Image (cartoon, rainbow, N blue to C red):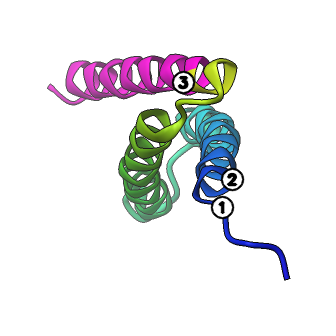
């Protein structure tokens, strides 16, 4: 059985974070295009709640992966860029929500 390597765990976490960020971005675009249902947009609301939970989880995973990837500068830079893009995505969607609900 191979010996457990912490660095491999964080490389996997970094790659998983980047894949999750792309999936989350696609999910946000699909939610923005979704129309309301007949009884108060419950499906859209549940989708956005799931998106916010995934956003917080992925942000934590990306921050942990970025902090632990010393020996992999390209992956660390990709995680750093992903964190900046994810923060911009969250701020942009929060601004969109505030403008359209006020």
Q: Earlier in the sequence, mark 1 or mark 3?
A: 1
Q: Nearer the viewer, mark 2 or mark 1?
A: 1
Q: Position of residue 60 (x, y in %)?
A: 37, 48
Determine the secondary structure under disc 1: loop
Element on which disc 3 rests = helix
In which quadrant of the rendered view does residue 72 lie? top right
In this view, the residue farthest toward the right is: 1
**Which residue is denoted by mark 2 in the rendering?**
8
For image coordinates 41% across by 45% down, the residue present is 64
Which mark's residue is nearer the viewer, 3 or 2? 2
Please identify the quarter of the rendering in which residue 87 is found.
top left
Q: Identify the residue at horizontal 59%, vertical 41% (top origin).
A: 24
Give the CA distance from mark 1 to mark 3: 24 Å
Which residue is situated farthest in the bottom direction here?
1
Image quadrant holding the C terminus, namely top left
- Extreme-left residue of the structure: 102
Residue placed most toward the observer, 15 or 40: 15
Residue closest to the eye, 5 or 98: 5
Our reading of the magenta stretch's main secondary structure is helix
- Disc 2 from disc 1: Cα separation: 5 Å
Q: Report which residue position mark 3 lands on.
A: 82
Which residue is the site of mark 1?
5
Q: Are marks 2 and 1 in contact (CB under 8 Å)?
A: yes
Give the crowd class for mark 1: few <14, some 14-19, many >=20 residues within 10 Å. few
* Residue 78 location, quadrant: top right
Q: Residue at x 49, y 21 (%)?
A: 80
Q: Is residue 99 magenta?
A: yes
Find numbered disc 2 in the image and state the secondary structure of the residue it sits on.
helix
Q: From which residue to which does the magenta span run?
A: 77-102
Q: Is residue 1 left or right of residue 65?
A: right
């Amino acid at each position: 059985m191979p010996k457990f390597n912490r660095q491999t765990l964080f490389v996997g976490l970094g790659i998983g974070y980047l894949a999750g960020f792309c999936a989350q971005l696609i999910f946000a675009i699909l939610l923005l295009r979704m129309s309301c249902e007949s009884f108060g947009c419950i499906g859209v609301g549940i989708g956005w709640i799931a998106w916010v939970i995934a956003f917080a989880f992925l942000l934590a995973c990306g921050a942990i992966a970025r902090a632990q990837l010393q020996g992999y500068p390209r992956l660390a830079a990709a995680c750093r860029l992903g964190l900046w893009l994810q923060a911009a995505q969250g701020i942009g969607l929060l601004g969109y929500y505030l403008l359209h609900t006020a």
